[in-house]
Image (spheres, rainbow, N blue to C red):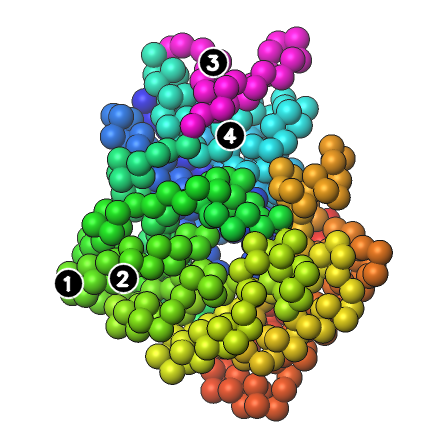
Amino acid sequence: MKIALVNPPSPPEFRVSRGLMGGFGMAVNPELLYPPIELAHIASVLEADGHEVSIHDSDALELDADGALAAITALEPDLVCMDSSSTSLDCDLLLSRRIREGLSVPVAMLGSQVTYTPGEIFEGDNVDVVVRGEPELTVRDLARRRSAGESLQGVAGTTWQRADGEIVHEAEREKIGTLDELPIPARHLLENDLYRFPGLEEAVTTVKSSRGCPLDCSFCGYTLAQGLKFRFRSPEHVVSELVDLHRNHGLRQVVFRDPIFTTRKDRVRDICDGIMREGLDLEWQCETAIKTLDRPTLEKMAASGCRHISLGVESGNQEIQKKHCGNKLKDHAQAQGVFDDCRELGIETRAFCMIGFPEETPAMVEETLDLVERLDPDQVQFCAVTAYPGTPLYKMLYGDERLDYARMTGFQALEGNEHMTAGDIEAKIREAYRRFYLRPRRIVRELRHPVRMAGKMARYFTLFARRA
């Protein structure tokens, strides 16, 4: 059977990277284009089951909705499975409806947004079935049903609508326990040379070496999508994927997309040993928590090609850290040591920070800004606190209320708190960027990389773009 896996076009206002924020997606720098690695994981499972699979990435091909529809139609699929995000959901659903009407084939939709608001997705007769949670085995079972000419109803991990309008939520599907049982992602179905990362001249790819995060931050979409239990691929399995992407696809730039890459430091050191043992000429980066790092691990990471680490600082206020951020930054001295070690070892750093927590006052924001200036990372990202459906923070703030998901860009404040309005929060984010990057010492450093500086300036001026 022919199956098309689709990454739809971004909205015209900005690019969306659907794999970020635990699958809720996020508006990103237009120079950032990650491969739809989740679709590549699904594709490898479907190919192992005997299907003919295509991955269509509208953003990589720079196609709008009309171009995407024409390209998907040309594939003549028997089943279509589309990714989605919060801020692009209306556009995703419109394309899905056009595919169903034009091709008369069933369309499934996956992603964290549709997982946690599945009933709403059927209001416009846009899709046939919603894939909730981890998609690989659920999509495989839908394909088996379709191939056998059977109904798509009754598959664990899905939601669908009866003819009378009743929404049916099938039983939850258990998360995949042994990730090594999954084949490595089907990169041969991607146009690998099209994917890029700001500041890198070479093509970039992404790797998911683990799933789950035990820190349980109140705002985090990753724990929703992947669970609190840390599930990991063995170092050997990860290295086999690195060997494939490097030797078979000619890729050198790797971004590990694990929520907390160094949760198990021994596993990370074994991966580093495998990279060096295989003689892989890679440069790689990851995201992790400061408290899961130490000097010996950083030394091993640097020796194996780690060139950049994004670190969750979130807030400099201890009350907010304990209540909302998994207490991942309880020791500022240890944090300073990690950033200093990275500088000494030649590893660039990015600090992820958030502004607009429910209890946050302007004075608490100042604590964050002061801390980030002391840590002095190479790059910083300030986001508006965004409560995604299903998160503890969403339940705390909104209960069952339905929001305008198109506003969930990651930078646009959805609302204020008792101390700051939404406008105040966005003003604080602008102030934070200016204050960090316009320091004289920082300006001198930025001038050493003029192309990267130009990208940062362009990003700053598009941060708060609104959907029309």
| Residue position for label 1 | 277
Between discs 2 and 1, the one toward the N terminus: 2
Point out the stretch of residues depicted in magenta: 149-174
Q: From mark 2 to mark 1, how far is it between C-alphas? A: 12 Å
| Residue position for label 4 | 132
Taking 400 as reference, is 49 left or right? left
Between discs 4 and 2, the one toward the N terminus: 4
Residue 251 placement (x, y as % from top left) = 27, 59
Q: Which disc number belongs to residue 269?
A: 2
Residue 163 placement (x, y as % from top left) = 62, 9
Taking 345 as reference, is 310 left or right? right
Q: Quick one: SS at disc 1?
A: helix
Q: Crowding at label 2, few (<14), some or many (≥20) Cα neighbours within 10 Å? A: many
Between discs 1 and 3, the one toward the N terminus: 3
Look at label 4 and name its amino acid.
Arg
Q: From mark 1 to mark 3, how far is it between C-alphas? A: 47 Å
Instruction: Check residue 45 for magenta coloring.
Output: no
Instruction: Check residue 159 for magenta coloring.
Output: yes
Depth-wise, is mark 1 or mark 3 nearer the camera? 1
Q: Is residue 91 visible?
A: no
**Closer-to-camera residue (318/79):** 318
Q: Quick one: SS at disc 4?
A: loop
Q: Is residue 399 visible?
A: yes
